[in-house]
Amino acid sequence: MKVRREHSLGTAEARRRVDEIAADMGARLNLQSEWRDDDLQIKGSGVNGKIAVSEDAVEIQVELGFALMLMESSIRVAIEDAMDKHLS
């Protein structure tokens, strides 16, 4: 699953806000995260992916395990809501 949002925050502020998104999503899905350059690697039980930050966009790429694939649409909505909340 990929979700992308454009922004005008600059890389540093977008990274700060991505930390907030990761904290929100991490609490819901029990995720761990680690920065590698401008990519926040995320991993958890049945979840693997990254949040890529650039000067003008944030893109979340997530692979879901079989059990979570059944909830893909609700997970997508939660991710989109978090991105809209933190990047606007």
Image: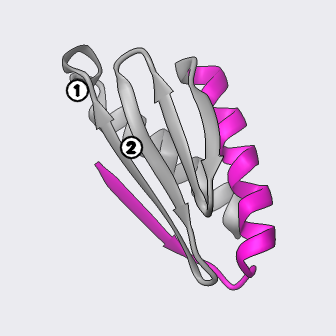
Q: Is residue 8 above or below residue 80?
A: below
Query: What predominant SS class does the magenta segment belong to?
Result: helix
Q: Earlier in the sequence, mark 1 or mark 2?
A: 1
Q: Identify which residue, 46 or 76, lies in the foreground.
A: 46
Q: Secondary structure at mark 2?
A: helix
Image location of residue 42, percent across then percent down: 51, 36
Image location of residue 78, percent across then percent down: 50, 40
Q: Secondary structure at mark 1?
A: helix
How many numbered circles are shown?
Answer: 2
Q: Which residue is mark 2?
A: 76
Mark 1: amino acid: Met
Residue located 59% across and 22% down the image: 28
Q: Identify which residue, 87 or 38, lies in the foreground.
A: 38
Residue located 62% across and 28% down the image: 26
Left or right placement of residue 39 versus residue 70 in this view: right
Q: Identify which residue, 3 or 62, lies in the foreground.
A: 62
The picture quadrant where one finds residue 56 is: bottom right
In the rendered image, residue 6 lying in the magenta stretch gets the answer yes
The range drawn in magenta is 1-28
Left or right placement of residue 19 versus residue 6 in this view: right
Q: Which residue is mark 1?
A: 69
Q: Is residue 35 above or below residue 54?
A: above
